[in-house]
């Protein structure tokens, strides 16, 4: 039996190492937090599905030249499409007033107009819907105490960026309503890049809430994985410039371009800097170089990760990223040499969001599991 003094000492030691004194979250509270994380993660995955759908339908809208078919921005009333013949004629009359119809589509029938109208309407409807899918559950999870303190500013930031994206989308469309026959490639690239930033933020947030089977990777691996996200984003921006200038419809050979590895007249426009944004030949050439660069960086990252974290989940994901990029390059080359048919072009477009999402998830995965909040944080 313990003596009285020994008992008091043992009791004091037990108190000293109790969970509360170490600021550890009790097991029951941990279970509640993990359960809430699963619920929130499932909701964010639904948001991601909507974002992917918006991205793909937006690509189809661009490829079919449908983006200017709705000439007004009606965030609420615009949810309801035309139903009667009179409503369709009214919508078509508005389209006939803009340069795209007058210079490119003069003589288009009402049925042909409906074909491009539905693409743009579906794109806008999805964009409106994702706002609801994001906002309403956010209010519910917040009000019921299911959101950890660190999550709240991230989710509010994503919601705010979504609202900004709607304004940027109309700013883009407005560029093609008075003088241009299509939207400005600058504004198109801005719209697409902001969409990708929102997508990355959403994927990273969801991935942070998921269970992690491996510990955090070496800091060098984490940093390189982060730069891979930046590289893929930059390449998508370059792809948007290609789409905005219809640059993929010219120089449809590979690996040569205009008969050379390095074509001439890359700086035919003055000042020289505008060639990177307005010269179709230069824009396509830089996009090709960007693809090679991203692939080389991915190979370096895969070798680095295999060396610093051999036989790990991180190394396997880095290798899979290389494979995905090779597949994406194959889709791009096929679309190019076939002179950008819709089917191959939309596959290449969808492949871009797949690569970006995987790269973002891989980057967050290298950081390891999101720590549980301390007991004091939970109490407050």
Image (cartoon, helix red, strand yellow):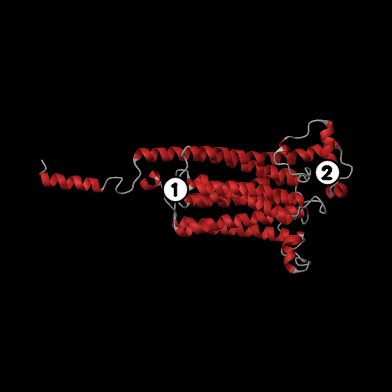
Would residue 160 appear left or right of 115 to someone viewing this image?
Answer: left
Residue carrying label 2: 95
- Asked if labels 2 and 1 touch by Cβ distance under 8 angstroms, the answer is no
Within 10 angstroms of label 1, few (less than 14), some, or many (20 or more) residues?
Answer: some
Which of 240/93 is in front? 93
Would residue 245 appear left or right of 323 to someone viewing this image?
Answer: right
Would residue 348 appear left or right of 251 to someone viewing this image?
Answer: left
Residue 320 visible: no
Q: Residue at x 69, y 61 (%)?
A: 286
Residue 55 sits in which quadrant? top right
Please state the horizontal and vertical placement of residue 143, each as a whole percent of the image: 49, 38
Find residue 370 and name its label: 1
- Picture quarter with the C terminus: top left
Please state the horizontal and vertical placement of residue 94, each as a whole percent of the image: 83, 42
Q: Residue furthest top?
A: 84
Please state the horizontal and vertical placement of residue 114, each as a whole percent of the image: 80, 37
Would residue 130 appear left or right of 8 to someone viewing this image?
Answer: right
Q: CA distance from mark 1 to mark 2?
A: 50 Å
Q: Residue at x 38, y 44 (%)?
A: 379
């Amino acid at each position: 039996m313990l003596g009285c003094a020994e008992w008091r000492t043992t009791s004091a030691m037990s108190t000293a190492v109790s969970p509360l004194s170490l600021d550890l979250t009790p097991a029951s509270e941990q279970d509640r937090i993990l359960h809430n994380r699963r619920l929130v993660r499932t909701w964010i995955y639904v948001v991601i599905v909507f974002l992917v759908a918006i991205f793909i339908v937006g690509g189809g809208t661009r490829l079919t030249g449908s983006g200017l078919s709705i000439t007004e921005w009606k965030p609420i009333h615009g949810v309801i499409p035309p139903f009667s013949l009179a409503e369709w004629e009214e919508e078509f009359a508005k389209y006939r007033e803009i340069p795209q119809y007058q210079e490119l589509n003069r003589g288009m029938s009402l049925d042909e107009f409906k074909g491009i109208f539905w693409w743009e309407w579906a794109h806008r409807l999805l964009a409106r819907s994702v706002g609801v899918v994001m906002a309403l559950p956010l209010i519910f999870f917040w009000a019921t105490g299911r959101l950890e303190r660190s999550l709240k500013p991230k989710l509010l930031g994503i919601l705010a960026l979504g609202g900004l994206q709607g304004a940027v989308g109309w700013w883009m469309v407005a560029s093609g309503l008075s003088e241009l026959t299509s939207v400005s490639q600058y504004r198109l690239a801005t719209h697409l890049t902001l969409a990708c930033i929102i997508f990355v933020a959403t994927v990273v947030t969801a991935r942070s809430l998921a269970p992690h089977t491996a510990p955090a990777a070496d800091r060098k691996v984490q940093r390189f994985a982060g730069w891979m996200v930046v590289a893929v984003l930059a390449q998508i921006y370059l792809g948007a410039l290609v789409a905005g200038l219809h640059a993929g419809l010219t120089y449809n050979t590979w690996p040569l371009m205009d008969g050379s590895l390095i074509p001439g007249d890359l700086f035919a426009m003055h000042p020289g800097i505008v060639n990177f944004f307005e010269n179709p030949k230069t824009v396509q050439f830089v996009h090709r170089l960007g693809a090679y660069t991203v692939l080389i960086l991915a190979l370096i990252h895969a070798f680095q990760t295999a060396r610093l974290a051999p036989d790990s989940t991180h190394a396997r994901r880095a290798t899979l990223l290389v494979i995905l990029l090779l597949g994406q390059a194959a889709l791009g080359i096929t679309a190019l040499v076939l002179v950008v048919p819709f089917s191959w072009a939309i596959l290449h477009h969808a492949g871009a969001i797949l690569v970006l999402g995987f790269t973002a998830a891989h980057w967050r995965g290298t950081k390891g599991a999101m720590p549980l909040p301390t007991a004091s944080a939970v109490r407050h």
